[in-house]
Amino acid sequence: MPVVNIALCTGCGNCVDACPFHAIVIENSKAVIDESICKKCRKCIPACPSDAIS
Ligand code: SF4
Ligand code: SF4
């Protein structure tokens, strides 16, 4: 399961656009992954310019 490092996340939304399953939303300017939707495809990880998802 990918994890968002909240301290590094800028809320840019790149990961939201990158997720084919619409599993990521921005809440309070931070990315939140819905674990019940995430398929663990890991496409969000390279999409983050801040290396906030690992
Ligand atoms: S691993 Fe895939 S399905 Fe899960 S949040 Fe990232 S892009 Fe979306
Ligand atoms: S791409 Fe990275 S910095 Fe941008 S919202 Fe997603 S986790 Fe945060």
Image (spheres, rainbow, N blue to C red):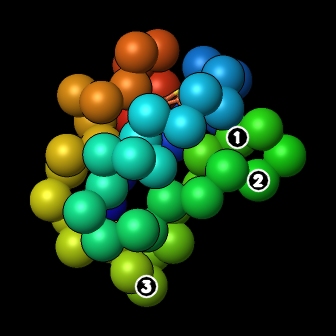
Q: In the rendered structure, find residue 30 and report the number of the disc placed on it.
A: 1
At 67% across and 50% down in the image, what residue appears? 26
> Does residue 4 appear in the picture of this structure?
yes
Q: Amino acid at mark 1?
A: Lys
Q: In the rendered structure, find residue 27 and report the number of the disc placed on it.
A: 2
Q: Amino acid at mark 3?
A: Ser
Question: Distance of mark 2 from mark 1, alpha carbons?
Answer: 5 Å
Residue pushed farthest bottom? Answer: 36
Q: Are the residues at dot 3 and dot 1 in contact (C-beta closer than 8 Å)?
A: no
Position of 23 relative to 29 (above/below):
below
Q: Residue under circle 3?
A: 36
At 19% across and 46% down in the image, what residue appears? 43
Position of 21 relative to 31 (above/below):
below
Image quarter of residue 21? bottom left
Q: Are the residues at dot 2 and dot 1 in contact (C-beta closer than 8 Å)?
A: yes
Q: Amino acid at mark 2?
A: Glu
Label 3 near ligand 1 (CB < 8 Å): no
Decide: few, some or many residues near mark 2? Use Cα within 10 Å; few <14, some 14-19, many ≥20: few
Label 1 near ligand 2 (CB < 8 Å): yes
Image quarter of residue 13? top right
Whether residue 11 sits left or right of residue 49 in the image: it is right
Quadrant of the drawing holding the C terminus: top left
At 46% across and 49% down in the image, what residue appears? 16
Decide: few, some or many residues near mark 3? Use Cα within 10 Å; few <14, some 14-19, many ≥20: few
